[in-house]
Image (cartoon, grey):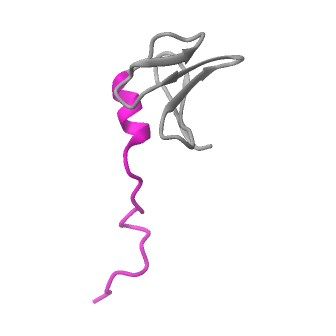
Amino acid sequence: MNGLKHPVSKFIYEKDADGNIKVTDGNRWGLFRLDGKWIAGEIFECDPQMCGWVSGPRYANHRLDTSADKH
């Protein structure tokens, strides 16, 4: 899975196959909805804004896109 590391807590935020956010810290984990509400696991709190970043759509970098017309 691809995820983001929180800049303060260093927890890893990853989107799972069901669209939920899995937050891990070593062997501990927590599962959260896209709005940051807890579902399961031993980590009970997360950063809801990080959940939004991880769950959002991924776009190709426009600077690396070779399909654009070049003038």
Q: Depth check: give the residue in front, 25 or 21.
A: 21
Whether residue 64 is in magenta: the answer is yes
Whether residue 25 is in magenta: the answer is no
Q: Depth check: give the residue in front, 6 or 21.
A: 21
* Prevalent SS, magenta region: loop
Give the x, y percent position of residue 37: 39, 19
Give the x, y percent position of residue 5: 53, 30
Q: Which part of the image, by quadrant, shows the N terminus?
A: top right
Question: Which residues are drawn in magenta?
Answer: 48-71
Give the x, y percent position of residue 69: 31, 86
Which residue is pictured at 37% across the width and 44% down the height?
56
Viewed as shown, does residue 64 lie left or right of 26?
left
Q: Depth check: give the residue in front, 39 or 57.
A: 39
Q: Which part of the image, by quadrant, shows the C terminus?
A: bottom left
Question: Quadrant of the rendered structure where residue 53 is?
Answer: top left
Give the x, y percent position of residue 34: 39, 31
Of all residues, the one furthest to the left in this rendering is: 71
Question: Quadrant of the rendered structure where residue 24 is?
Answer: top right
Which residue is pictured at 34% across the width and 27% down the height?
35
The relative height of residue 40 versus residue 64 in the rendered view (above or below) is: above
Of all residues, the one furthest to the bottom in this rendering is: 71
Question: Quadrant of the rendered structure where residue 70 is?
Answer: bottom left
The relative height of residue 67 versus residue 60 in the rendered view (above or below) is: below
The relative height of residue 63 versus residue 26 in the rendered view (above or below) is: below
Viewed as shown, does residue 26 lie left or right of 19?
right
